[in-house]
Amino acid sequence: MPPRATGDWHAVEGIGCFSQSANGWTDNFICHQWFEKTFIPFAKGCNISRKPILLISDGHQSHETPEMHALAFDNFIILYCLPPKTTHKLQPLDVGVFGPLLLAWTSHCENRAIARNPITHYNVLAEYMEIRACSMKPTLIREAIAKTGTWPIDFSKFSNEDFAPSKHTSTIPSFPPSFPKRALLAPNSSDPLASSPNHKEAEG
């Protein structure tokens, strides 16, 4: 999307503009400014069908402010936040965009370092935006959207295993008080049960 200088955003010649927050994450103000000044004009300009516009987000609180809801309602935009714990399957950027971008950026930084022309805070924006433009192609984005099953719609992206309870990963066994004593092994230095508090209780 074409960047625009809004609010506390800083324009960089030949690149566009950027903003910053205290903790490095998008906050309510920045997201609202981007939504109003960049997304809405760009999305409406591309909306040939004049049907409602769907914006899918990852559910961060900055994506669901009352101001954004009001703007979305006035501009015929549907805001849909992905359910918690599903972005690894449903967020196109996570599924198929950020990975290749990270690899390309890492390789670029390493090559610049080898050439003794490293990335610094003076050139990081220009260098990153160049790699981003080369990596985030429309074809890659379409493929990522298809992988999530968002479009074309594919309900098979989630299997029964995805809804199964978490697997027990602790290496220290734990037993209820009613656990049969005879089922416990005799404690020894190599027996993990020997260090279990429940084992000692069962022995007693």
Image: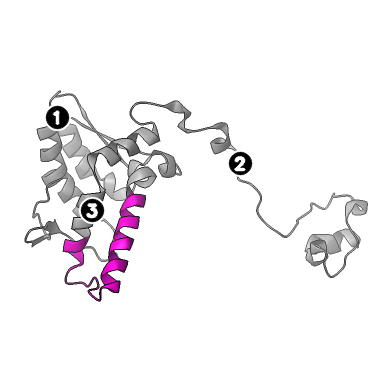
Provide residue 160's location: percent of width, then percent of height. 57, 32
Residue carrying label 2: 165
Of all residues shown, which one is farthest toward the bottom? 116
Q: Distance between the residues labelled 1 and 2?
A: 42 Å
Quadrant of the rendered image containing residue 43: top left
Q: Mark 2 against mark 3, which lies toward the viewer? A: 3
Q: Element under label 2?
A: loop
Amino acid type of disc 3? Arg
Provide residue 104's location: percent of width, then percent of height. 30, 56
The reply, left or right, for residue 150 in relation to residue 163 is: left
Residue 179 vs residue 167, the one in the foreground: 167
Residue 202 counted in the magenta span: no
Residue 58 seen in the figure = no
Provide residue 123's location: percent of width, then percent of height. 17, 68
Query: What residue lies at 23% left-to-right and 63% top-to-bottom?
Result: 21
Residue 124 counted in the magenta span: yes
Provide residue 42's location: percent of width, then percent of height. 12, 39
Neighbour tally class for label 2: few under 14, some 14-19, many 20 plus, Cα within 10 Å: few
Residue 150 seen in the figure = yes
Residue 109 vs residue 148, the one in the foreground: 109
Task: Name which of mark 2 and mark 3 comes first in the sequence.
Answer: 3
Which label belongs to residue 47?
1
Task: Name which of mark 1 and mark 2 comes first in the sequence.
Answer: 1
Which label belongs to residue 175?
none
